[in-house]
Amino acid sequence: MKKRILAFMVCVCLMAAVFLVPSVTALADGGGSWSDESNRDTAWTDGAISTPQQLAQFAYLVNSGSYNGNGEVWLVSDIDLAGNEWVPIGYRDNDNFYSGLFNGNGFTVANMSITNFTKDYNEVGAYGLFGIIGGTVQYVNVTGDIICREFSQYYYSGGIAGYSYYGKIIGCTSAVNMSFDAAPKVNASSLGGIVGANYGEVTGCTNHGNIYLRDGNASPVGGITGVNAGIIDRCQNNSSLQGVTTYLGGIAGQSYFQAGYYNNPQITNCVNTGSIIDNNSSEWYYYGGVCGYASRTEIRNCYNIGEPVDMKATYGNLAGQLSDNPALDNCYYMENGSFGLGCYENTFIKDNQSLDQGEKRVAVEMQSEDFLAALNASENAFIRGTDYPVPAPLPLTVTIHTEPAGADLTVMQGDTEIAPQSDGTYLLIPGDYSAAVNAENYASKTEAFTVTFNQDTHKVNIVLDILPADYQAVDEAIGKANALKKEEYKDFTAVELAVNAVDRSKNITQQAEVDAMAKAIEDAISGLKYKDADYTKVDEAIAKAEKLDKSKYKDFTAVESAIKAVVRGKNITEQSEVDAMAKAIEDAVNGLEKKPVSQTTNKTTSKPAASTGKGTPRTGDYSNMHVWVVLLLISGVGAIAVISYVRKKKRV
């Protein structure tokens, strides 16, 4: 029995766990608030934001009146707000709102969740990434949800900001879905895809977030803004607007003049593609493809292709109601059986079609180049989209710095040249470009660059490489030096030093230095002195010749001439000539012929040769003088020998 009870209890616990775990998980997923100290980076004070904790700290400082920065904050990465409730930056109706510059740099704040709304009836609530702004918010994308199921106060809600007080919202995108599933207690609330209420300027923004308002009473709803008392330009709404309220429009729910703001509120160069869905209104509610209700407002260069659904309100493809000297110019709508206006100065168009305004077109016409040209008749505010024209991206001020400064610069987008502004900067829409840069003494360069909403791409630096100096003369001089045989010179050091001193890093502005290097090498070459030729063989040949007894040779003249022909002072390059001198002497010596030796006799009985004269030699006949001298000496020796012999005999 006990075992059965125990088993039953285990089963109960397991079943409880099955049902409780999802609840606990859901509670954990709900998280806390980004305003909690544990979720904030309390060390952050100003400047760059890279984490959700730093963004939360920024919001906390603004909301608590503690922000003392220099008024410029920017994102350097995408921010993910998943897991905690977002508390808007400056969300209360007090002086604690941001009036500086917030630059999203094209990054995205994702998964923003706002579900907690103030219950104080006397307090205005503004909801979005920002609550109330008085400065500039630009180039930020926001995704997430704003869900309100119970409220009892004034509320202004937008994906980027709830309320713009002389603020500027530029180049932002919202994909924040808004659902207000409760009726407001007052009639001064406003919902917009970008900003709930615009008393400033909204430029170049796009909304992708759907808006649902169950029962808004007199609360305007718009794809870009609920209420407009300022300027809306180049904006597009691509999402559906659904609910029951007095004023609902694809771009603005209501637009009107309000003293202290803009004298002529404007909606220009805008597009609505989102559906306008009526959830059970009446003909006294005004719904429009561009604006629900427009008073003293200029609507120009706009078109609507959004589809009206279940329409019971007074609907116009461009405006539900125009009044108080409005202006509607160059505006178009897709033909769908409805008029351009629903009502003009409180007269229903269905009752007086002559009051209708705007031009209807069929789809194929609105996709044509002619339609694009019609929209751009007064300004180039549209470009070709995938099917239909879309507002042109906002031009960004781009500074292109060249080094050297003042270089010739040509900026191209494709085949189109972009002219600079008077201050030298360029207005460029996001995209790919190229810049051709030329400057004297520098190598020309064409550099590609991309412009995005990130401010880092708004400054382009192009550095040209300075041309190198011309080393041709240096190379020629070095080639000349390399062709020399240094062993032929007395001292080659100066040439080697000049060659080794060559600095190849010089540029064209230092050409004189390079020319001096070439000259130094040339001068060193010119100053070279050859080694002396080797006269050893010559000297040996001469010494050999001088040892000879020239009297023994028939003719010694050739040897003497060869020796006299020796030229001293020849250098090593003339060694062959010196060697030839030595050879000439050697050859002359080798060519000598000795004189023949005369044959003498000791016979005294021999008969002297007959004289051809008168018995005595002719005066001056010395042809055999040396023979006579020898004979005389022999005779003398013989006579002395005879006398010595006779004397010895007598003594004996």
Image (cartoon, rainbow, N blue to C red):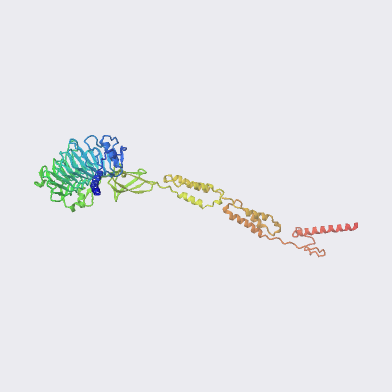
Which quarter shows the C terminus? bottom right
Q: Where is residue 70 shown, x and y percent of the image?
A: 30, 36
Front in this rendered view, residue 32 or 543: 32
Answer with the quarter of the image where residue 166 lies.
top left
Q: Where is residue 410 shown, x and y percent of the image?
A: 32, 47
Left or right of 159: which side holds 590?
A: right
Name the residue at the front extreme. 1
Q: Is residue 71 above or below residue 609?
A: above
Q: Is residue 149 above or below residue 600?
A: above
User: Which residue lies at the image location 22% right of the left edge and 52% below the top edge?
Assistant: 387
User: Which residue lies at the image location 70% right of the left edge and 57% below the top edge?
Assistant: 550
Front in this rendered view, residue 348 or 195: 195
Q: Where is residue 336 shown, x and y percent of the image?
A: 14, 51
Answer with the quarter of the image where residue 129 lies.
top left
Q: Where is residue 548 shown, x and y percent of the image?
A: 69, 56
- Residue 143 seen from this side: no
